[in-house]
Image (cartoon, rainbow, N blue to C red):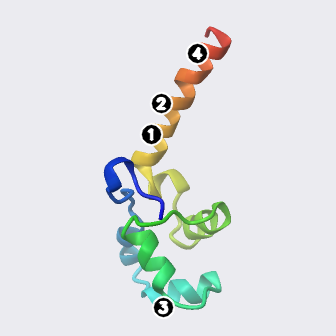
Amino acid sequence: MIMEKGNRPIPNRLNMHRRLMRYSRIQVVQLLDLQNTSILCQWEKGRKLPSAINLIKLSIIYRTYPNELYPQHFNEQMLVLRQKERDLFKV
């Protein structure tokens, strides 16, 4: 199970965007060609991260960008990578 530091759920806006689109979990699962709603529930609760392809599909379904679905995770990773760039390339 992929969790944030300290076993906290990974913050995301999947549920919010699904509700804004007025889609049920079953409808999203059908669009993603998944077997059932359990994996979508795990993504929405922050217990697991979707694969890259499913993240892209979710952003298309919800008509938003992937970084909008996981804004905190995106910002944290951006900060880490920018620091690595500065250290590696002395920028």
Q: What residue do we see at 44% from left, 38% from top?
A: 76
CA distance separating discs 1 and 2? 6 Å
Q: Label 4 amino acid?
A: Arg
CA distance separating discs 2 and 4? 11 Å
Secondary structure category for the residue under label 2: helix
Q: Where, quadrant-wise, is the C terminus in this rendering?
A: top right
CA distance separating discs 3 and 1? 30 Å
Observer-side mark, 4 or 3, equals: 4
- Where's residue 52, x and y in %? 64, 60
CA distance separating discs 4 and 3? 45 Å
Left or right: where does residue 64 sit relative to residue 3? right
Left or right: where does residue 1 sit relative to residue 55? left
Q: Label 2 amino acid?
A: Leu
Which label sits on residue 86? 4
Q: Label 3 amino acid?
A: Ile
Which of the marked residues, 2 or 3, is nearer the chain's N terminus?
3
Which of the marked residues, 4 or 3, is nearer the chain's N terminus?
3
Q: Which residue is mark 3?
A: 26
Secondary structure category for the residue under label 3: helix
Q: What residue do we see at 45% from left, 70% from top?
A: 43
Q: Which image quadrant for residue 24?
A: bottom left
- Where's residue 27, x and y in %? 51, 89
Q: Which residue is mark 2?
A: 79
CA distance separating discs 4 and 1? 16 Å
Cβ–Cβ under 8 Å for marks 2 and 3 = no
Left or right: where does residue 13 sit relative to residue 58? left
Q: Which residue is mark 1?
A: 75
